[in-house]
Amino acid sequence: MVATDDYFPFARAGKPVIQQKGKETNALLLQLTATAKEELQQFTARHLSRKMVVIVDNKALAVYTTDKPVNSGLIIVTKCGRLACRQIFEKLNQL
C-alpha cells in the first residue's frame, strides 16, 4: 500500500534519456524543471530514511530510501533491464 497524502507531481525539463550501463542493464535519466527540483528537495527532506515510490500511470516504477535531501533535480532509475527501461522511457515520453 502506498500513502498518497503527501506527494509531488514531477515535471520534466526535457525528454528522458536511456544510458547503457552494461550488456543487459540500462539506466533512465530524467531532468526535472526548476520548480519540480525544489519540490523534490522539500519532499525528500520531509521523508528522510523512509521509503518513497515513483509512480507513473498508476504503476510503481521504483522504491527509494534517502538519508539526505535530493538536490540535483535529476531522477535516475538504475538497474533496469533493456526492456524495462524502454517501457518506462516510452511511458514518460507520453507525459
Image (tube, grey):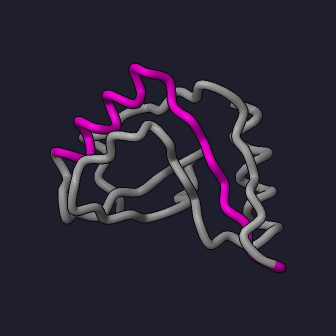
Residue 65, quarter of the rendered image: bottom left
Residue lying at the far top of the rendered structure: 35
Magenta-highlighted residues:
23-45
Residue drawn 75% across and 36% down? Answer: 93
Residue drawn 16% across and 45% down? Answer: 46
- The verdict on residue 27 being magenta is yes
Residue lying at the far bottom of the rendered structure: 23
Residue drawn 55% across and 54% down? Answer: 76
Residue 89 as seen in the image, left or right of residue 57: right
Q: Quadrant of the C terminus?
A: top right
* Horizontal and vertical percent position of residue 75: 51, 47
* Horizontal and vertical percent position of residue 53: 41, 57
Nearest the camera: 6 or 80? 80
Q: Is residue 13 above or below residue 77?
A: above
Q: How many marks?
A: 0
Q: Is residue 45 above or below residue 86?
A: above
Residue 12, quarter of the rendered image: top right
* Horizontal and vertical percent position of residue 30: 60, 41
Q: Is residue 23 above or below residue 49?
A: below
Residue 59 as seen in the image, left or right of residue 54: right
- The verdict on residue 33 being magenta is yes
* Horizontal and vertical percent position of residue 6: 25, 40
Nearest the camera: 2 or 44? 44
Q: Quadrant of the N terminus?
A: bottom left
Nearest the camera: 3 or 50? 50
Nearest the camera: 81 or 31? 31
Residue 20 as seen in the image, left or right of residue 1: right
